[in-house]
Image (cartoon, rainbow, N blue to C red):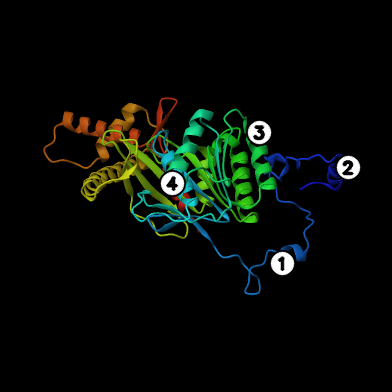
Amino acid sequence: MLTAKQKKEQLQNNTEVKAPIIPLTDIKPTPKNFSIPSVVNVGISDILSKRIDSTIEIKPIIPTVYIADSRFAVKGDISMISGKPKAGKSTITKMILATALMEEVPKDFDSLGIRSNYCKGQNVIYIDTEQNPADTFEFYNEVVKITGLKKAPENFIVLNWRDFDYQQCLEHLVAIFEQIKDIYMIVLDGITDLIPSSNDETSSVMLIRYLMKESTVRNTCIIACIHENGDSGKMRGHIGAEAARKCQGTISVRYDEAKKVRVIKPLFLRRGKMFEEIYWESESGIPRSCSAELIEKLKSEQATEDKRKIECEEILNQVYIKAKDTGLNSAELLKYVKTYQPSKKGESADACRKRAGRYIDTMKKLELITEKDNLWYYDRTGQQELFNNE
């Protein structure tokens, strides 16, 4: 918003005066020396201004993105897309953006089960903090091609912030909310580039609270993309953990290089039903849903892998009770896994040791155990605990 002085200068000079950019650090950040205030300047009217009851008009929830008919993203909230690099997050965001710009989506159009409600002329914004501008331009053209439109609509705004540091990213994000009206959706591809470190707890909490606030105040949908740690499915750093606790929905995109197949996996949907995993291929350069026969085969293989993971977790729960949650060196870990792995009648000592080694290899691959100072530790919490919102 322009100040009275700026408006006066604009009229006198007949020049455009830009609204001031407010850095995120000025928006009541969470201090590191947090404490409960002893004195507050909050009256009863302030308290009751946030009251919820039958006399208050509450804006209804407006869905913006569905995946397999399950509600993934809505106006007034944030949602997350996670995945390892090159897993297929860009393809998912293309489908979200393209269908938001399509007044009518052909019935035979394979959008991988992803459908955004039509934006009705409101602004659809995509922010790329990671790629080279040439790659972002290619992304832009591909989205327009998917829509079937002859040219990109004016309300489709694509921005590249690769050359920005995190503070510049924050300043421009604040400016977007202050100066661009009627925002239907913002896809923020690279949320970790808006903070000093993905493991900075204070800035992570502050950024997520800010996005929650702006999505509510502006009644817009914010979808952020974030990388995952290894094969664990955990979103990166404190920022990922905080987003998982507060968001409307979270999906994970996986790529099986051996099978040349990608999958969309629901991790958490606050209001929607958990949809079945969506399998798709893109080896030809065009994303296509997998055939029913291939899906059945992949589900069977996934069930076997899930069973193996559960076995590993059951073993680790026993191992680290015995170890009293301390770190174990490699020899100790092998010894305990041999002890608590499912027994096999008639198995030789050498075969038992090799089988324990295979379990440990799986535990490492799934990042169920992590190494620090030559000791192995087991994270009992896991990603799913983050979604047990009470």
Q: Which one is nearer the viewer's eye here, 177 or 297?
A: 177
- Residue 25: name its quadrant: top right
Give the structural element (helix, strand or loop) at label 3. Answer: helix
Q: Nearer the viewer, mark 1 or mark 2?
A: 2
Distance in Å between CA atoms under marks 1 and 2: 43 Å
Residue at image point 63% right, 53% down = 182
Give the structural element (helix, strand or loop) at label 1. Answer: helix
Say which label, 1 or 3, has the lower sequence index. Answer: 1
Is the Cβ of the residue at disc 2 closer than 8 Å to that at disc 4? no
Q: Nearer the viewer, mark 4 or mark 3?
A: 4
Residue on which the image places disc 4: 148
Circle 2 crowding by C-alpha within 10 Å: few under 14, some 14–19, many from 20: few
Furthest-bottom residue in this view: 55
Residue on which the image places disc 2: 12
Three-letter amino acid code at disc 3?
Answer: Gln
Residue on which the image places disc 1: 48
Three-letter amino acid code at disc 1?
Answer: Leu
Residue on which the image places disc 3: 168
Is the Cβ of the residue at disc 2 closer than 8 Å to that at disc 3? no
Three-letter amino acid code at disc 4?
Answer: Gly
Distance in Å between CA atoms under marks 1 and 3: 37 Å
Looking at the image, can residue 382 be seen?
no
Q: Nearer the viewer, mark 2 or mark 3?
A: 2
Say which label, 4 or 1, has the lower sequence index. Answer: 1
Furthest-front residue in this view: 150
Is the Cβ of the residue at disc 1 closer than 8 Å to that at disc 3? no
Say which label, 2 or 4, has the lower sequence index. Answer: 2
Distance in Å between CA atoms under marks 2 and 4: 46 Å
Give how far across and how far down residue 270 sits, in percent. 47, 57
Give how far across and how far down residue 310 sits, in percent. 30, 46
